Image (cartoon, helix red, strand yellow):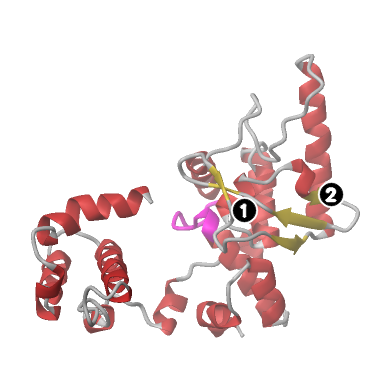
Amino acid sequence: HRRYRELLTIHVFPAFESRRLVDLQRGQIARYLAEKLSSNLSRNTVRNIHATLRTMLRGAVNDGLIVANPASELGRQLRLVTSKSGRQEEIKTMTRAERERFLETAEDCTPRFAPIFRTLASTGMRLGEALGLQWAEVNFIQNEIGIRHALGENGKVDTPKSGHGRTVDMSSVLSDRLQRLALQRKAETLATGSTEVPVWEFCTTVGTPFSAPNVRDAMSRVLKKATLPAHFTPHCLRHTYASLLLQQGESIVYVQRQLGHASIQLTIDTYGKWL
């Protein structure tokens, strides 16, 4: 919400706020976006500017204020939309050996962050979903994790990106690691003289949840120590999880369910080359 407001304030309003909706022409918007592309803005920023403007104008069509959306289809015309094959080529994944080296190095280099890296790499959940995990949502008997919350970049707790929760399977290796983490949290709590274990599964020494920048910084340190490419991010662990499942012959339906994709088509479009 904050990002869309920035796009509106900085880019869209200065160019269009004094114009009437009925006077907006497709060519005007196309030229505006082309100028943004030729400036120092990234293609992704221009794509988001177009998406913001297109969505507003779609609302105007739905409200009967204009007949057609002059911003529609410009994404393809200006090549703001990445093709399926292009998206798949942009995805960065670790090999199985790189994944294991990363996780082993994390245990040695950043032991407090190692459990969240193991969780990301073993369940395919998004970073915000992992940051929002609470102990009450981990079922060690059924080896399942209920994803009910997501912690945003602003530190606020919200619903997951899909708009609803889901349950993901937990491997025996991950289950063992998280059980050890639970014992560690209890020991830390007793050492402070308290009896209340922090509700957050992945937290700081004072019980507050990790922030996304904290995790990214820790991952950078681990990658450097493990001599792995610096372009890997926490989200790459999600891609790695999906690609390794598909390479070993797992069902695309199962991968979709674990990742929480809204449709199986999205899973195929994103990871089709590994099928």
First in sequence: mark 1 vs mark 2: 1
The residue to which callout 2 is attached is 176
Label 2 Cα crowd, 10 Å radius (few <14 / some 14-19 / many 20+): few
Q: Is residue 52 above or below residue 22?
A: above
Q: Residue furthest right?
A: 141
Position of 119 with respect to 187 (left or right) is left
The residue to which callout 1 is attached is 102
Secondary structure character of the magenta stretch overall: loop
- Helix, strand or loop at label 1? It is helix
In this view of the protein, which residue sits in the foreground, 134 or 93?
Answer: 134
Q: Which residues are magenta?
A: 226-235
Residue 94 in sight from this viewpoint: no
Q: Is residue 229 above or below residue 37?
A: above
- Helix, strand or loop at label 2? It is helix
In this view of the protein, which residue sits in the foreground, 56 or 146?
Answer: 56
The amino acid at mark 2 is: Asp
Label 1 Cα crowd, 10 Å radius (few <14 / some 14-19 / many 20+): many
Residue 142 x %, y %: 88, 58
Residue 107 x %, y %: 69, 43
